[in-house]
Amino acid sequence: MRQTALKDKKGLTLIEVLIALVVLLLVFLALMQTALLSIDANMVNVLRDEAFNIAEMRMNEARNTQFDNLLEGTTDVSPPPRNLRNITGFTFTANRTVTNINSDNKQVDINITWDWKEKTAENGDPYTHSLRMIMRRR
């Protein structure tokens, strides 16, 4: 009995399929990493926006306070923990520092700090947002 050799070699070998799968796996891993980075950057922006809103709210409170009632020193004006993006317990620390420049002017500094992933107050490197305003006696 005589065997006939196939002259049509249009099929794929197992090695070619495995190499194609490895390349496809590398592409999907790169896409996954890109998605994770974009989610993290988006969350940092959400937290920064919330810190800005808190700082603006605390600054408006200082603006609406009588000049003589703004006492020199640092005051803790932190809000309660917040829920953002269905994640509970984001804690923002807010400090208001009032400095007397002279008898008619005071400087008000609002400093907001918050933690996200490795950037924490425990590590000495939290995220921060600061506002400064000069108030004049009316």
Image: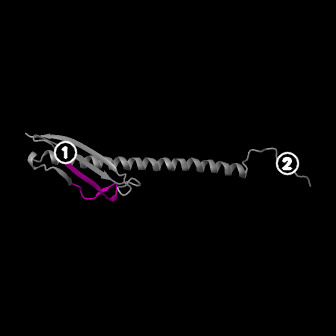
Q: Which mark is residue 5?
A: 2
Q: Nearer the viewer, residue 93 or 73?
A: 73
Q: Position of residue 84 (x, y in %)?
A: 32, 54
- State the residue lying farthest toward the right: 1
Residue indicated by mark 1: 108
Q: Is residue 111 left or right of residue 30?
A: left
Magenta residues (range):
77-99
User: Within the magenta stretch, is there residue 79?
Assistant: yes
Report the residue at 34% width, 48% height from top.
46
Q: CA distance from mark 1 to mark 2?
A: 89 Å
Report the residue at 73% width, 50% height from top.
13
Report the residue at 63% width, 50% height from top.
22
Q: How many marks?
A: 2
Q: Position of residue 14 (x, y in %)?
A: 72, 52
- State the residue lying farthest toward the bottom: 89
Q: Position of residue 138 (x, y in %)?
A: 7, 39
Of label 1 and label 2, which has the lower sequence position? 2
The three-letter amino acid code for the residue at tag 1 is: Val
Q: Is residue 122 left or right of residue 103?
A: right
Q: Secondary structure at mark 2?
A: loop
Report the residue at 18% width, 51% height from top.
73
The three-letter amino acid code for the residue at tag 2 is: Ala
Q: Which secondary structure class fits the magenta region best?
A: strand
User: Within the magenta stretch, is there residue 130?
Assistant: no
